[in-house]
Amino acid sequence: MENKLSSNFHNIISKFQRKALVTSIRDGLVSMIPVLIIGAFALILKTFPIKGYQTFITNFANGFLLQLFDFVYSATFGVLSIYMTFSISRSYMKIKADPNVVHGGAIIASIMCFFILAGAFLPEFGIDKMGPKSMLPAIISGLGASSLYLMFYRFFMKKKLMSFAAGSDRNFNRMLTTLLPILLVVSCFALTNLLIIVIFRTDSFHDFYIEILNKLFSVGKNGFFKGFFFVLLSSILWFFGVHGSDALEGVMQNYFVPGLAQNQADILNGLDPSCVLTKQFFDCFVLMGGCGATICLLIAILVFSQNRARKGLGLTATIPMVFNINELMVFGLPIIFNPIMLIPFLATPLVCYSISYLAISTGIVPMIVNEIEWTTPVLLGGYLATDSIMGAMLQLFNICVGVLIYLPFVKALDRESERTNKQMYLDFIDYYKANDQKLQNETLTEMNNVYGNFAKDLCAELKHDLVDNIKMYYQPQYDYSGKCIGAEALLRWRHPDHGILFPPLVVKLASECGLLLKLEEEVIKTALSERDDLINKYGEDIVLSINVTGNTIVSSEFLQFIRGIDKVTPFKGKNICFEVTEQDTLIFNDKTYEIFKEIRDMDIELAIDDFSMGQTSLQYLKHNLFTSLKIDGSLVTGLMTSLNCREIISSITELTESLNIDVIAEFVEKEEQREILHSIGCDNYQGYLYSPAKPIIEDED
């Protein structure tokens, strides 16, 4: 029953997260992370809550530093809603992925519509309307304008109503096709905004929804329930991507900011402070680390999460969140539009609010009597606001409770990520195998789809785990009499989540992220270090074969690496063979010949992997540098059903016999295959008939 409920919950979450609108918002916000990081640090440097520091940045070089921080803040958080509109629109159009539609037109339309909803036509319109206060117009514009644009563009394309200018270049004509769709989209938004202004007697859509929010608090006393509702509504707005604190700034100014002045006046008059709810109350005891009391979430992630990416985000967000700036966590995790995080994100600040209200109203913790900056770190803020260590202790207690609330949901996030990553990996591997030949000439990490993003993640993990998680498996080779004549060292990268990854994919990714040379050097060092164990297992006469790609083996860096090994522990007499595998066609020239000759002079054998009768493969035989070759696996697997495969293998064995080159057949899985190979002159085998590839110590698997 529990597994069924868990499966149903997982399906609901997956369906919700696959919705185009939700994905567009979340992906759009994630792409804003660089803006958020830069803006967060600019804000910290600008508002660092130490009086001496503030005096220094204000006075140094006539306020040069303060102005510098202001410039960066204004260019990031100051116009955050513009970035949001752009990012969401771009993300939405990428998801729709219609190559026949000019995507740039949707972005232009979205930004124009944002300015309409935000009230750019008003005389008092300023930069404050382009920052976090206008997130709701940004989301509506990014999604609404883009979807309308897509609909209009497709309609005009279908009706062949697009206009083109004769003789103009292609880009000009493409942008000209966006004119009518943009015009219609902007007209729809302008008309809607005008109707709102006329019907509700307001100045703009932005002012309209702010006025509605403020009116919700116009009834009732300034007590527990008004504060409770303020925290709840602020958190709900944040969850849906609206900057709750800014949207409810009018409520804060009208109902809670005067509380501190009242407390200070009470003290001056010899009375006890009487107002529990002040701005500092919310800043210190409810919004610890920012909205949702996310300092608790941060601690839960850093201490208990098993997800490395999430921990990395937590570490990056730590410094801003110490100063109660949590946009990086809210948008980067993300919290918004994340159904798993809805309950703790709403519940934690409400529980902290209730505990704090009870503690202060009953006198356990003193009333707030001092004004402090909202960026004052936790514990210090509680102490300074109340002039009591009990204020800091209340914050600490709230944090412990908040961590306990967030903890099971952090674990749920880990489980969801694990499921998603496993399925993504399986889909990615199926995609890679199905398109293997095509993808050899493409860069996986540059693909503009989910597989490209997954490839980037794997590359980042490969860089991190190159040495620690590289393992070598060995597949023995036997002759017809049953004697072991060698073993091939095969790369295995054990991913912490997905287990052993598909080896050709690992090599491909290593090549793309500039790690191929280092990877192959690690493979050689590991194989050589395990050579004695192989000899003990298979016999001292075996040849240890190690794969080296064509690009690597002809590089001067690799040759230098081999020289270094040979100088310390010479290869002579060790029966080492490099199997040349081809990621790219290996071109023979004088330089290639000299490198191969030097390798052979070190007493290292050379073998050709995946040999067939093609012109490229035959080129390798001209120089008498290779001592053996492996028959292309497709020929071996096909020889039982195809006479052509038998004829080709027979031709290869006759050719190599005259050149005194050994032949090994891979993928030998059945006795019948071996007998056919023996009858056409091939007596060396490698495959499941004898053994799969295994580690030296088999219980490692």
Image (tube, rainbow, N blue to C red):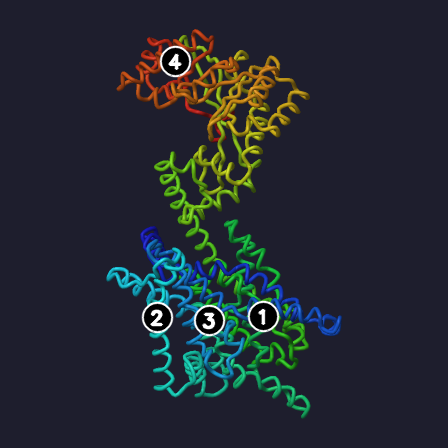
> Which residue is identified by label 1?
74
Q: Position of residue 611 (x, y in %)?
A: 42, 20
Q: Is residue 155 visible?
A: yes
Examine the rendered structure and indicate whether residue 567 appears above or below residue 278.
Answer: above
* 3D distance between C-alphas at marks 2 and 4: 68 Å
* 3D distance between C-alphas at marks 2 and 1: 29 Å
Tell me if mark 3 has few (under 14), some (14-19) or many (20+) residues whose alpha carbon lies within 10 angstroms of its own: many
Q: Position of residue 156 (x, y in %)?
A: 28, 63
Examine the rendered structure and indicate whether residue 570 appears above or below residue 145.
Answer: above
The type of residue carrying mark 4 is Ile
Answer left or right for 605 relative to 454: right
Tell me if mark 4 has few (under 14), some (14-19) or many (20+) residues whose alpha carbon lies within 10 angstroms of its own: many
Q: Farthest residue in the bottom direction?
A: 269
Label 3 sits on a secondary structure element that is helix
Callouts 2 and 4 close, C-beta under 8 Å: no
> Which residue is identified by label 3?
135
The type of residue carrying mark 3 is Met
Label 1 sits on a secondary structure element that is helix
The type of residue carrying mark 1 is Ser
Q: Farthest residue in the left direction?
A: 159
* 3D distance between C-alphas at marks 1 and 3: 16 Å
Which numbered disc flags the more N-terminal residue, 2 or 1?
1
> Which residue is identified by label 4?
652
